[in-house]
Each structure stands twice: as C-alpha cells, then as structure tokens.
Image (cartoon, helix red, strand yellow):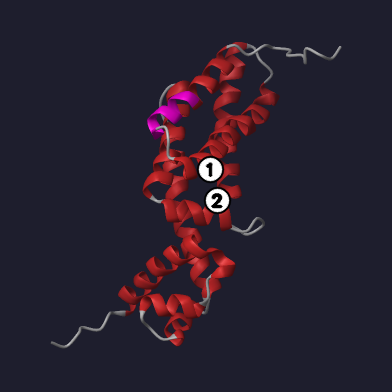
C-alpha cells in the first residue's frame, strides 16, 4: 500500500507538534534541526523549507502558546465578582499547566525575556488587567488607586510562582491549590489597611 504524502499544511502542523515536544523536553539550546527532523522522520531541508530553521519554528510555537494562554487568562478576568475573577484566573492557569504541560514549559522556562512575546509579556498583560480591576475596587473603598498596580504585581506574581511550583509537584489538586491561592489573596484584599506600616519600623 502506497503511503499518502502529507500536504504542506499537514507537514507544517506535524513539525510544530514535534518541535513543541522537543523544545519542552530539551529546551531551546538543546534542540537542533537534526533532532526535529529525526523525530519527524524528514530531512533537515524540510524543516528549513517550512520555518527557516529552529528559531522560526520556535517563534511560531511561542506565538501559538501565548495566544492560547492569553485568551484563557483574559476571558477568566473578564466577568464575575472580584473574588470570582481571581478564582477563575488561578484555575485556568493551573489547568493550562495540567493539560498543556509542554506549552507551559516552553513559555515559563525557556522563552527569552526581551522578545516580542514571552511569558513575562503575558504576565505584564495580566497585571494591567488586574490593576484596572483593583483600581475600581480601591476607588469604591476609599483606598489609594495609584497603588493598584503594586497590588496587581503581587497578586499575579503569587499565582504565577505557585503555578511554576505546581508544574513539578502536581499535589494537591489544582482545585485545592486555586482555593488556597484565593484564600490568601481574597482575605488579604478584604482586610487591606489604608496606610499599612511595617511593625518593626517607626
């Protein structure tokens, strides 16, 4: 039986899937065009033809992961009460870690700071959205709106760093982890002091 040849689009998608797994396992520096070609059972020129090299393939993979995760986080922060938005954002990030582990590994551990799209730029976008939500809430409660960005940095950092920790641990469940993140964030926000002071300093 003659094996049917892949179309150009099918080959491109195959190389993206193979590259995604390779970059997640070996990192950007540890992955070569030879490795990708061997895993896809094609010659090196095929990889170059579609992506111009591993850098081009990597850029496509990063862009896809960023768009997918960005949409999830943006949607999670879009509707609901203050607490529900925190819950939704924590849970979607942990779900992404669980279901798209390779993609999260590439974004969080390997994407290069300073590039147009990276995990850092995604977090920056999330900080902007959370800051807007907090500024509105601070205004209603008579708190200093100019500090909303500081609190947004702290909140997004807490969720992000916990997600990185959970990437390797996977215990307890994502629902339990999300509930505890929200417990810390929500109860901290609910009891905010207008003029907090360090206890050991005058």
Q: Neighbour class for label 1 at 10 Å: few (<14), some, many (≥20)?
A: some
For the C terminus, the image quarter is: top right
Q: How many marks?
A: 2
Position of 18 compared to 185: left or right? left
Residue 175 inside the magenta-drawn segment: yes
Rendered image quadrant of residue 131 = top right
Horizontal and vertical percent position of residue 21: 42, 63
Cα distance in 3D space between marks 1 and 2: 8 Å
Q: Image height check: is 5 above or below 13?
A: below
Residue range in magenta is: 173-180
At a point 57% along the width and 34% down the height, the residue shown is 156
For the N terminus, the image quarter is bottom left
Q: Which residue is mark 1?
A: 164
Image coordinates of residue 25 in percent, x first then y, are: 48, 62
Q: Nearer the viewer, mark 1 or mark 2?
A: 1
- In contact (CB < 8 Å): disc 1 and disc 2: yes
Look at mark 2 in the image and give the residue it sits on: 108
Specify whether residue 118 is in view.
no
Query: How far across and how far down the image is residue 27, in percent?
Result: 54, 63
Where residue 112 sits, quadrant-wise, is bottom right
């Amino acid at each position: 039986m003659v094996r049917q040849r892949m179309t150009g689009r099918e080959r491109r998608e195959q190389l993206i899937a193979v590259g995604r797994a390779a970059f997640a396992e070996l990192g950007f520096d540890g992955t070569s065009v030879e490795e990708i070609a061997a895993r896809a059972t094609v010659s090196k020129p095929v990889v170059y033809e579609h992506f111009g090299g591993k850098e081009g393939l990597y850029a496509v993979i990063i862009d896809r992961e960023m768009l997918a995760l960005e949409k999830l986080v943006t949607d999670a922060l879009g509707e609901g009460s203050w607490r529900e938005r925190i819950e939704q954002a924590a849970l979607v990030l942990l779900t992404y870690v669980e279901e798209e582990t390779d993609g999260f590994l590439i974004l969080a551990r390997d994407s290069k700071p300073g590039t147009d799209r990276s995990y850092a730029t995604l977090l920056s976008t999330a900080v902007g959205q959370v800051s807007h939500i907090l500024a509105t809430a601070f205004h209603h409660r008579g708190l200093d709106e100019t500090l909303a960005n500081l609190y947004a940095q702290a909140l997004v950092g807490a969720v992000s760093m916990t997600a990185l920790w959970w990437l390797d641990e996977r215990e307890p469940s994502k629902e339990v982890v999300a509930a505890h993140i929200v417990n810390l964030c929500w109860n901290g926000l609910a009891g905010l002091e207008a003029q907090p002071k360090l206890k050991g300093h005058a």
